[in-house]
Image (cartoon, rainbow, N blue to C red):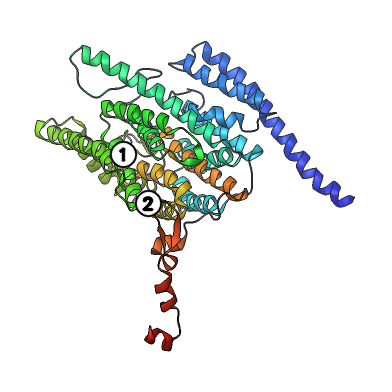
Amino acid sequence: MHARRMTGQPSRLRDWWAGVWRWVLFAGGVAAGGYLLLDRGIANGVVTAAAIGAFLIGAVLTASKPMAIALMATPALFIVERIGIGPGDLTVSDAALAAAFGTAVFLGDRDLSPPLKALLQLNLIYQFATLFTVIANPFAQNVIEWFHAWLLISGALLSGWAIGRAGKARTALVLIYAVATLIALGTLASALALIAADDFGAVYPQWPWAMHKNFAGGALAFAAFVAYINPDWAQIPKRWARAALFLFLAALALTQSRQAMIGFLVALLIHVLRQGAARHWVLITVIAVPSAVLIVQSVVEQIDSQNRFNSVYQRIEWMQEVYALWKHSPFFGHGLRYWYVHPTANFQPPQAELEVVASTGLVGLAGFMIMWIGIIIVLWRVDARFGMLALGSVLARIVQAQFDLFWVSAQVSIPFLIAGICLGAQALAVSRGEAKSFWNDRRRATGRIATTRTGRQVSRSTRHPARSRVKNAPPADRARA
């Protein structure tokens, strides 16, 4: 009786904390929504207030649907409007991720799978490496960004995991389709307005909210990869996924976001190589060739123009300035978000490793490289049925960041949320007996499992039983054979 009483206390305590979290979020949402509807402190208060309204609906539904807040936060991750509250200058996407993370911690499943644990540990290595620059450079933005960076990766992973583990992976991916469709339609509308004015330049969508072309392109690239993979466990009809894929790719081409296109193409190539077949070579060719021609042509035109202010020459100049700045603090860097406080270097470095080394020094760069190499290895080893979408999403992000900014809130959290959803769905399938293991079958990697024409997987030893019997026979019998 005493033991039963002891085990019931932690459960009641968790329920109490969960209830407190729900009502605190509800009260804060009401206050923030009223403030923002008055259009104070933010340029587009109506959009932000609408997102907060969705959180409130989730808070009300949490009692019966524990993952309601996390699901409502999923489309809000794509809203990059600034909230304008507090010293961190956070976005709606950041607030949505914080709400989803809180829900995952209090109401989500705590039995984390081995792949997710490995990813969280790799992120902790990076966080520990960057702790030195937080100590060496004491200013507010440095400390805030240290926690923010952890939330963008580990917080997004845990939020996605909780959604997938609760059996809501399909709903979350449908919401991603929906918000990406809005962005695509807004891009097409903006493009039509530009074409009417004889302007064929890059499109910066203004609806449903104002977006930079590289953010819109990155979001569309992630959604296009989700639509292309269209995992069976998501249970999304193939015809709808294909229609969405072509819509997203058309809008992506209009943004002319080169880094988003390259990231998508690299993820696509890795997927095809892992398949070991050329079943989709026509579709790959139709997508890859025009994109590659557009990318090369645009870069060549910018170089030939000799315009010192275009994106190519501007990036080269910025890289030179960042290198000169890094030499003054090579080991621990100048602090996360140093461009907010540095008197001369007031811009964010336009490349991932360059930004990390300038911000956190060689120590932080080592942690960053360990984290990313480890993440790719872990996701490569995850069962491809669940791991391919996760691998391609995060791989596309690191490829994009070789040509542009890396630590941009939504562009980091979205691919890791997708990866978390995949791992959560896998854990649910394993618990139900629908999947046997978290990891790829070693025999598949070494070629000891083959696929018949009917799609049935068989061992190579069973494909030729006579050969198998000869091979496994005693030496004397093998010689007679």
Vertical placement of residue 205 versus 105, above or below: above
The numbered mark at residue 349 is 1
Within the image, what quadrant is residue 324 found in?
top left
Front residue of this view, candidates 447 and 457: 457
CA–CA distance between discs 1 and 2?
A: 14 Å
Q: Position of residue 358 (x, y in %)?
A: 34, 45
The numbered mark at residue 62 is none
Q: Position of residue 263 (x, y in %)?
A: 31, 41
Which element type, helix, strand or loop, lies under badge 1? loop
Residue 147 in view (yes/no): no
Residue 267 in view (yes/no): yes
Which element type, helix, strand or loop, lies under badge 2? helix
Within the image, what quadrant is residue 249 found in?
top left
Who comes first in sequence, dot 1 or dot 2?
1
Q: Is residue 479 left or right of residue 291?
A: right
Q: Position of residue 285 (x, y in %)?
A: 24, 40
Quadrant including the C terminus? bottom left
Vertical placement of residue 329 versus 263, above or below: below
Kindly identify the residue that appears in the image at 61 percent across and 21 percent down: 57
Q: Amino acid under label 2?
A: Leu
Front residue of this view, candidates 357 and 465: 465
Vertical placement of residue 192 versus 391, above or below: above
Front residue of this view, candidates 164 and 285: 285
* Number of marks present in the image shown: 2
Q: Position of residue 43 (x, y in %)?
A: 43, 16
To which residue does mark 2 refer?
365
Q: Is residue 308 left or right of residue 444?
A: left
Neighbours of disc 1 within 10 Å: few (<14), some (14-19), many (20+) = many
Q: Is residue 461 left or right of residue 304?
A: right
Q: Amino acid under label 1?
A: Pro
